[in-house]
Each structure stands twice: as C-alpha cells, then as structure tokens.
Image (cartoon, rainbow, N blue to C red):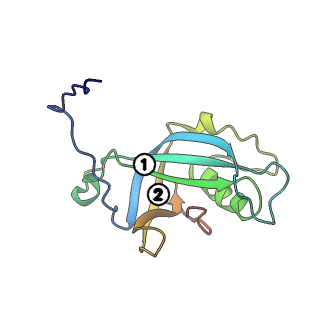
Amino acid sequence: MPGLKLNFAEVKEQSFETIPAGEYTTILTGAEVKEVKNPKDDAPANPQMVNWEFTIQATGNATHDKFADRKVWTNTTLYGGGMGRLKNLLSSLNEKVDADYNLNPQALIGKTVKIKVRVRPANGEYPERNDISGWANPEGTSKTASKSMLP
C-alpha cells in the first residue's frame, strides 16, 4: 500500500503548553450533554453532565493575547456539587437562574464569559494541566467554581 502524500506547507504546529493562571475573556464555543461514565455513590440514576468548551479571545493584553483562540474545557455534573458549579457558570453568562430553569446548553453558545484559569501541577498520573476555577460575567462580577470535575 503506498503512503499518503500530505502537504504541510501552510499548517501551523499546535501548542499544548499550559496557559498561565489568570482571568481570560472567552466565548462559549461548545456544550454537549453526556452520560457520566463512572458516577460516584451520590449520583442519581442515569447521571448526566455538560462538557463545556471555551475559546480565549484577544483583548489587547499581550500576555493573554498570546493564547487567543486556545480552547479550555471543563464539565459540570447535573446533580450534587456540580449543580452549584453550573449555577455559577449560568449566572456569569447573565442567565436568570430561578428555582425552575430550562437548561439548553446549545442556546448558550456564542456568549461571552471570563474564565479563571489555574495550573494544576503534574502528579504521577497526569502532566501539568489547566483547570477552570471560576467564572465572571463580562462586567466583572466573579463566581468561584467549586471543585473541578476534571481528572
């Protein structure tokens, strides 16, 4: 079988260097509801979560703009402690979160939110990586995310 001929002339190598801790203006660019694969004991029957994707935007800050167009991901479970994290995120997206709220993650795509990025140190299982530790609405009111659900 012959090899595949590829042209890399205009392809940029992707960087996966850790983003420095700080606050970044982002656009919510993806949201997908999924089943929790390894739920803990406090999970209800058929536990679900939302995987969120944020894309960092250029703002004129040279340090942060170096990471423009980079993606940062997190998730929120739709039960237990994840509900507090989700409420903080929704409030930061300027959603009115009442007792009854109809969550439609796809309808939130395109909204602006500031994320607080932290750097989690490497351990024996995972390399150094980024995590979202909180959110702020575009006007700057901070919401601290509770415990991360990332590995």
Quadrant housing the N terminus? top left
Horizontal and vertical percent for residue 109?
54, 37
State the image quarter where residue 150 is shown. bottom right
The type of residue carrying mark 2 is Ile
Indicate the secondary structure of the residue bearing disc 2.
strand
Mark positioned earlier in the residue sequence (1 or 2): 1
Disc 1/disc 2 C-alpha distance (Å): 7 Å
Horizontal and vertical percent for residue 113?
49, 50
Residue for badge 1: 26
Label pair 1/2, CB-CB below 8 angstroms: yes
Horizontal and vertical percent for residue 71?
41, 48
Query: Residue extending furthest right?
Result: 45
Residue at 46% in and 47% down: 54
The type of residue carrying mark 1 is Thr
Residue at 21% in and 25% down: 5
Q: In this rendering, is residue 136 above or below 121? A: above
Residue at 24% in and 53% down: 66
Q: In this rendering, is residue 124 above or below 32? A: below
Q: For this rendering, which residue is in front, 68 or 33?
A: 33
Residue at 40% in and 68% down: 127
State the image quarter where residue 33 is shown. top right
Query: Residue extending furthest left?
Result: 9
